Amino acid sequence: MVMLYHSPLFEHIRTYLLNVSQHETIFLFVPYIHADVLAKLLNGIENSIVIVTTWEPTDLLSGASDISVYPYCQARGITLYVSEMMHLKVYSIGLNSAILATGNISYRGLMPKGNYEAAVYIEHLTNEDRLFFNTIQKNARLVDDDMYLKLKDWVRLNVIGVPKLPTLKDMIPPLSREDFLVSALPMTYSVDVLVAGYGMIRAGQDPSDNSEVAACIFHDLANYSIPLGLSDDEFRRELSNRFFAHPFICKMDEFIAPEAYFGRIKEWIQNNCTDVPVPSRRELTGNVQVLLEWFVSLGNGRYVVDIPGARSQRISKVTHID
């Protein structure tokens, strides 16, 4: 079903977002966001929320973008990313459905007496759509305190004007594969489940009846930039190559020399990840469980996991493979 909405868009979009189920994540891909309008839009919504926006210095200086969005997101526990390539405006529940709009999250974009705007409700996003949005998030830069303070100070010092305005790339280093974010780790609990889900997508179906499993599958396909249309064998080979080529995994492979226990791996990830705030070791338990499974399943016999004595799980490198 496709439904066209006309300005003002605020109530249409808010009504849509209020229909979110308890465990679904809200995704907002919107380039220009004002914190006060965002607060009104999300008032009373306690779900997990991911926002991808843009913070070009020229827009921050002009007020088109609002740097106070970050402290609002921090207070609400909202994950905020920035991308210099953002232009679309998409409001989505779980990347299952979406409102595609012309309006930004601003008074002129959503509120009465604002611009002439329109929006289209899309009842069902395709698998290709979900991969598209997952890729946007993957390639965006996670906002942290350092980025926020640097841009905030720049705006404060340049309110009068500067002869040549920089771009976001000039001020903030681009996303690097050396930025070891926990979100760069695999999420699907089993490689076999991922292969099966990929096969379902290839057949034009949803990858899983479980929405959380489906979200993990889409995350991993985007994370490792796996193209669609491969056979199962081709997919496994491509996944293995890209998994073991990832800098985070390469560093972890060096850490397993020749073995590493479960708790030590959690400690290593905590000490090496660049997430802000740094996740607790308890929060990393699921990530490590998935990692061990992937190392063994994709390692072609090079790794083995056991539980020696009464101790925790241990992953070891196999020195001789028949």
Image (cartoon, rainbow, N blue to C red):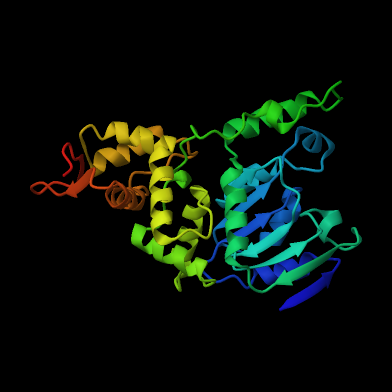
Return the x and y of residue 148 as percentages of the image width and height: 64, 34
Q: Is residue 74 above or below residue 91?
A: above
Return the x and y of residue 18 as percentages of the image width and height: 64, 70
Can residue 44 be seen at all in this image of the molecule?
A: no
Residue farthest along the top direction in this orientation: 163
Q: Residue shown at 14%/49% (left/top)?
A: 307
Q: Residue shown at 59%/43% (left/top)?
A: 139
- 17 displayed left or right of 266: right
From the viewer's side, name the closer residue of 266 and 154.
Answer: 266
Q: How many marks?
A: 0
Return the x and y of residue 32 as percentages of the image width and height: 76, 48
Q: Is residue 122 above or below residue 263?
A: below
Assign the N terminus to one quadrant of the image. Answer: bottom right
| Figure quadrant of residue 97 | bottom right
Return the x and y of residue 57 as percentages of the image width and height: 76, 33
- 159 displayed left or right of 99: right
Assign the C terminus to one quadrant of the image. Answer: top left
| Figure quadrant of residue 95 | bottom right
Residue farthest along the bottom direction in this orientation: 1
| Figure quadrant of residue 56 | top right
From the viewer's side, name the closer residue of 36 and 180.
Answer: 180
Q: Is residue 78 above or below residue 203?
A: above
Residue farthest along the left direction in this orientation: 309
From the viewer's side, name the closer residue of 280 and 291.
Answer: 291
Can residue 18 be seen at all in this image of the molecule?
A: yes
Q: Residue shown at 73%/71% (left/top)?
A: 121
